[in-house]
């Protein structure tokens, strides 16, 4: 299996190459590119079956490469930003790793392709067909972490830490179980497509809640349900399951 690395930080290229050698020795890094221009030329010239791609490059955005060249192989995006997940999966993405990532994160990304089970004995054309089949048959890929910023500092919040998401005008709040509130640069609709439906449910236009955040449920007017959340909502806010979602919400609770 032949891979390209598109990354403008030499240290990141070296770390990824070394980690691949440990967790997936059957993957050979055949070339690297540090810019959109270089990558555009590279993907059309070098035989490859997989791409590891950073999004922010020195001369532009990694998605520019898709407009300039035909990319026919799966892409594992590796970036420090969590705001491009939806766009990544619309552009050949089969996983989205947030820096810094560990060996197990990379191993799981490769497992989704079924690469670890393959020994690399088939031809390149067979490799690509097999890879496409594995990618198409893989389970849905859900986001596992969110990169948030607190002033000049940043941290990565895991989905297990998330109590609920609340849309407030142009802002989207991520609230953790311990009451911390972070802002995300995305919409609730974009977010709902990337969360596991086993863990989260969108109760209305403003709230996506986790099962673990539900403290109490109360019958409201008509068939609606009022959900008391932990940590509590700001004063004046209510989490009401919209009428058209009540039946699905009941089914979600009764799995």
Image (cartoon, helix red, strand yellow):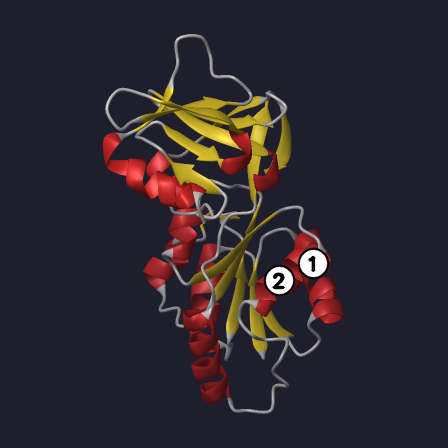
Between residue 32 and residue 27, name the one nearer to us. Answer: 27
Tell me, yes or no, whether the two marked residues, 2 and 1, touch with CB atoms within 8 Å: yes
Is residue 173 in sight in this rendering?
A: yes
Whole-percent x and y of residue 99?
A: 63, 46
Q: Residues within 10 Å of mark 2 (few under 14, many from 20)?
A: some
Residue 106 sits in which quadrant? bottom right
Which residue lies under the disc numbered 1? 104
Whole-percent x and y of residue 136?
A: 41, 71
Residue 80 sits in which quadrant? top right
Residue furthest to the top: 235
* Residue at the spot 62% in from the left edge and 62% down from the top edge: 108
103 on left or right of 179: right
> Is residue 195 shown above or below 122?
above
> Is residue 224 shown above or below 46?
above
Q: Secondary structure at mark 2?
A: helix
Q: Residues within 10 Å of mark 1 (few under 14, many from 20)?
A: few
* Residue at the spot 30% in from the left edge and 35% down from the top edge: 246
Whole-percent x and y of residue 243?
A: 24, 31
Quadrant, the N terminus: bottom right
> Is residue 37 shown above or below 177?
below
> In the rendering, which numbered label is found on residue 74?
none
* Residue at the spot 37% in from the left edge and 45% down from the top edge: 251
Whole-percent x and y of residue 34?
A: 56, 57
Q: Secondary structure at mark 1?
A: helix
Is residue 32 in sight in this rendering?
A: no
Which residue lies under the disc numbered 2? 108
Residue 104 sits in which quadrant? bottom right
Distance of mark 2 from mark 1, alpha carbons? 6 Å
Count every numbered label the image shows and give the total: 2
> Is residue 181 shown above or below 136?
above
């Amino acid at each position: 299996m032949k891979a390209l690395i598109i990354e403008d930080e030499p240290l990141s290229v070296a770390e990824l190459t070394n980690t691949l050698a440990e967790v997936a020795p059957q993957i050979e890094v055949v070339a690297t590119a540090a810019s959109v221009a270089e990558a555009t030329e590279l993907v059309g010239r070098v035989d490859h079956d997989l791409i590891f791609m950073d999004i922010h490059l020195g001369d532009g955005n990694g998605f520019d490469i898709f407009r300039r060249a035909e990319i026919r192989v799966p892409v594992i995006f590796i970036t420090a930003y969590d705001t491009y997940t939806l766009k990544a999966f619309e552009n050949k993405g089969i996983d989205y790793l947030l820096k810094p990532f560990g060996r197990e994160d990379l191993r799981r990304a490769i497992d989704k392709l079924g690469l670890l089970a393959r020994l690399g004995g088939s031809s390149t054309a067979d490799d690509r067909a097999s890879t496409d089949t594995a990618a198409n048959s893989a389970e849905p890929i859900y986001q596992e972490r969110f990169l948030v910023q607190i002033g000049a500092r940043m941290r990565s919040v895991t989905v297990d830490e998330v109590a609920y998401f609340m849309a407030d005008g142009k802002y989207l709040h991520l609230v953790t179980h311990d009451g911390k509130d972070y802002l995300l640069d995305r919409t609730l609709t974009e977010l709902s497509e990337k969360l596991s439906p086993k863990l989260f449910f969108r109760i209305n236009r403003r709230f996506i809640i986790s099962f673990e955040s539900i403290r109490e449920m109360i019958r409201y007017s008509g068939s609606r349900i009022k959900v008391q959340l932990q940590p509590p909502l700001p004063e004046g806010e209510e989490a009401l399951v919209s009428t058209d979602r009540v039946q699905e919400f009941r089914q979600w609770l009764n799995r």
